[in-house]
Amino acid sequence: MQELAEITSDPDAFERLYREHVEAVQRFVTRRVDDPYLAADLTADVFVAVIESAGSYRRSRGEPVAWLYGIARNVVAGEQRRERKELRMAARIRGRELVDDDDLATLYELIDCETAGRELHRELNQLPVGERAVLELVALDGLSVSEAAQALGIGAVAARVRLHRARRRLRSRLDLFDLGTSDLPEVTT
């Protein structure tokens, strides 16, 4: 990645950065949101934040790709906080909407089919925030443990410990629910 400070004043430098990393940022975002329009907006927001904060980047604090993922993580987290707040507000003012019998039958069927996925998601959410963040960056986003550490602003040893704990907790919790752990990705450090 070229010098990040250049992107604030050189459109060609920004274009190179964007072209080099847009697909990775899109993958990161789309694993966390399911609305394509929102994913496109958040991807754009990540690169706006990159431009705004490029002058403050210091190579001594980590690799540029880890810094980019850190920005992406912050943008997505901000959107998730906003969305949760919006949902809480909407729930306060909305009553139950009418659902017919066919809709209910379809919903019950979908709910039954997605039981394991919901349980896995609940278990991931039960992990301490720091452990879950490292696990997501390594297992889902394909960062190395060192890159994940840089993205989170922690040391590599702390990241390895968090990853080990997260995987151990998740495996033990999934075994309790007989969801199996054979699909959990193996992580190399």
Image (cartoon, grey):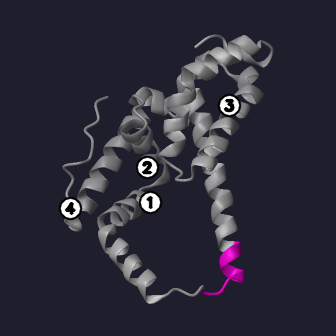
| Residue 147 showing in the rendered view | yes
Element under disc 4: helix
The correct choice, above or below, for 46 with respect to 180 in the image is above
**Which badge, 1 or 3, comes first in the chain's sequence?**
3
Magenta stretch encompasses residue 93: yes
Q: Which mark is residue 175?
A: 4
Quarter of the image where the C terminus is located: top left
Q: Label 4 sits on what residue type?
A: Asp
Please give the residue where the numbered disc 2 appears in the rendered image: 132
Magenta stretch encompasses residue 16: no
Label 1 to label 4: alpha-carbon separation: 16 Å
Q: Please report the bounds of the magenta region as a residue range.
A: 89-96
Disc 3 or disc 4, which is closer to the eye? 3
Element under disc 3: helix
Q: Label 2 sits on what residue type?
A: Arg
**Which badge, 3 or 2, comes first in the chain's sequence?**
3
Element under disc 2: helix
Please tell me how crowded label 2 is: few (under 14), some (14-19), or many (20+) other residues with Cα within 10 Å.
Answer: many
